[in-house]
Amino acid sequence: MNLGFAGSGNMAAAIARGLARSSRSPELMLFADSGSGRAARLADEVGGEAVGSLDELAQRSDVVVLAVKPAALIEAAGPLAGRVDGVVSVLGATPVARLREAFGETPVLRTMPNLAVEVGHGVICHTAVDPGDAALVEALEMLGSVARLVVLDEEHLDAATAVMGCAPAYLALASEALIEAGIEAGLPAEVSDQLVRDAAAGLGKHQLERDPADLQRAIASPGGSTEAGLEALRAAGAPEAFRGAVVASLDRMSGKA
Ligand SMILES: NC(=O)c1ccc[n+]([C@@H]2O[C@H](COP(=O)([O-])OP(=O)(O)OC[C@H]3O[C@@H](n4cnc5c(N)ncnc54)[C@H](OP(=O)(O)O)[C@@H]3O)[C@@H](O)[C@H]2O)c1
């Protein structure tokens, strides 16, 4: 399958980098941008080809990953609609009904990947795919080589986005703050940086096997230093701050903020 990318920004790059090293790469990856030169740089990096227009992308792709900003949906859909076997949208807060309006008869799939597809450990939430849409079924299977696929009712996709698409950035902010705290406590910057990243990576794996509350109990012995730190975090309102971040993300998606 030739997989086209309409848009060659952060998310397109993450998917393309993940696929380039997966066992289930497309035969050819094609990239388009709106003139920044990112398509050519990405094609060089992952071993694909940049095209000069969405028109050429439509001619040469079987399925297109729609990876422009939501505001560019209509502009990007024009040259693609009716000309490819399927469109996989990664657009935030863009319902299937809007995608269908833009793409007409072309089969569309709404997905929400997170950036960890780049390292083959992503999550991709998506609406149900019609088994008759063979090209989309094949594209989804390919994406499954870089992410866990989670099928959800569309009404749950925005909430899912807030906790799996946006939330890695909130957790990365916690890592950044901890690296700074380590430096303030006297560690050389590169040592603090590496230790926090290693601890976060270890936690990432560990959380797949043990639930977060259990892990906190296992690390924080009563009266110990971790317990003191957790108490300081709760006293500073950390749990409420994370809930607030999810609410702020959802408000932005619904246009309230
Ligand atoms: N970043 C994430 O973690 C994340 C997670 C989940 C979903 N998403 C979704 O992914 C989509 C892209 O986000 P991003 O962060 O990758 O944005 P980005 O870095 O700004 O990339 C957008 C890309 O779209 C291209 N583009 C815009 N209009 C175009 C047109 N008419 N024809 C061809 N290319 C066009 C831009 O071209 P230029 O390079 O020329 O500007 C750019 O390459 C968004 O809808 C977002 O909701 C992002």
Image (tube, grey):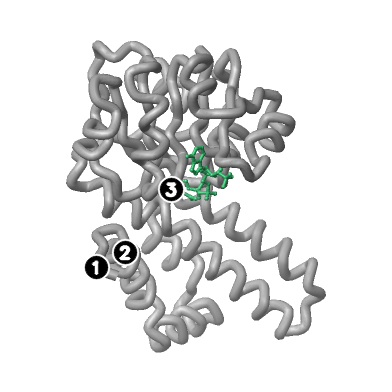
Give the residue at mark 3. 69
Q: Position of residue 123 (x, y in %)?
A: 42, 40
Q: Nearer the viewer, residue 257 or 122?
A: 257
The answer to whether any part of residue 137 appears in the image is no
The answer to whether any part of residue 72 appears in the image is yes
**Type of residue at label 3?**
Lys
Q: Position of residue 173 (x, y in %)?
A: 54, 68
Q: Position of residue 109 (x, y in %)?
A: 31, 29
* Nearest to N terminus: mark 2 or mark 3: 3
Q: Secondary structure at mark 1?
A: loop
* Residue appearing at x 51%, y 81% in the figure: 229
Q: CA distance from mark 2 to mark 3?
A: 14 Å
Give the residue at mark 1. 256
User: From the viewer's perspective, is residue 202 above or below residue 139?
Assistant: below
How many numbered discs?
3
**Type of residue at label 1?**
Lys
Q: Are marks 2 and 1 in contact (CB under 8 Å)?
A: yes
Mark 3 near ligand 1 (CB under 8 Å)? yes
